[in-house]
Image (cartoon, grey):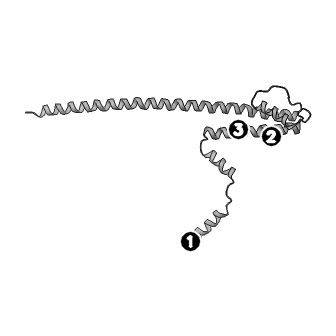
Amino acid sequence: MTPPPRKRLSAAGARIRDVPRPNPIERRMSKFLRQPPSIRIAASVIVTATVIIVVGGGALMRILDHKEYGSIWLGMWWARQTVTTVGYGDVTPKDVSGRLVAALIMLEGIAFVAIVTAAITSTFVARAQEQRNQAVSTAERKLGEQLDSRFAELAQRLDQLETLLRRP
């Protein structure tokens, strides 16, 4: 025997209340994945990832290759120039573990440049598409007005012909 509808609804509500709410990071991430990101959101993600990579890479270089990187600031200086693909060469990793960290930071730097380039390009493409659409809609509107006036003229001429044909 099934419980009355009111009891079923309250039992379902109790189950829903027991489900933990997603934390702010989960909510933001699911929103980010559901909707296409704007340039502002993409830029904030890129900047945040880059800052994390630079700070984390600097700390890792200090920990893993402490002979070459005497302070965390020197490690972050190296990570910043590596992630921006400048690479002055004043400090370079000597240990294998430092070189592995360097490879990851280099890949993030290449991705950073590629994403920034893509974001700027997509802005230009969107702007050009909008201008093209405006030009097309203006041309279509003018064509529509021309067609309307031509049809009105043809309708008037047909009315005149009908009037002439009705005369005895």
Give the quadrant of residue 125.
top right
Q: Residue 54: horizontal and vertical position, in percent?
A: 78, 37
Would residue 52 be found to the left or right of residue 2 on screen? right
- Quarter of the image with the C terminus in it: top left
| Residue, disc 1 | 6
Q: Residue 148: horizontal and vertical position, in percent?
A: 31, 33
Q: Dot 2, crowdedness within 10 Å: few (<14), some or many (≥20)?
A: some
Would residue 161 be found to the left or right of residue 92 on screen? left
Under mark 1, the amino acid is: Arg
Under mark 3, the amino acid is: Val
Please determine whether, in this image, residue 134 is positioned above or below residue 41: above
Q: Residue 35: horizontal and vertical position, in percent?
A: 59, 44
Provide the secondary structure element on which disc 2 rests.
Answer: helix
Give the quadrant of residue 165.
top left
Q: Dot 3, crowdedness within 10 Å: few (<14), some or many (≥20)?
A: few
Provide the secondary structure element on which disc 3 rests.
Answer: helix
Q: Residue 166: horizontal and vertical position, in percent?
A: 12, 34
| Residue, disc 2 | 56
| Residue, disc 3 | 47
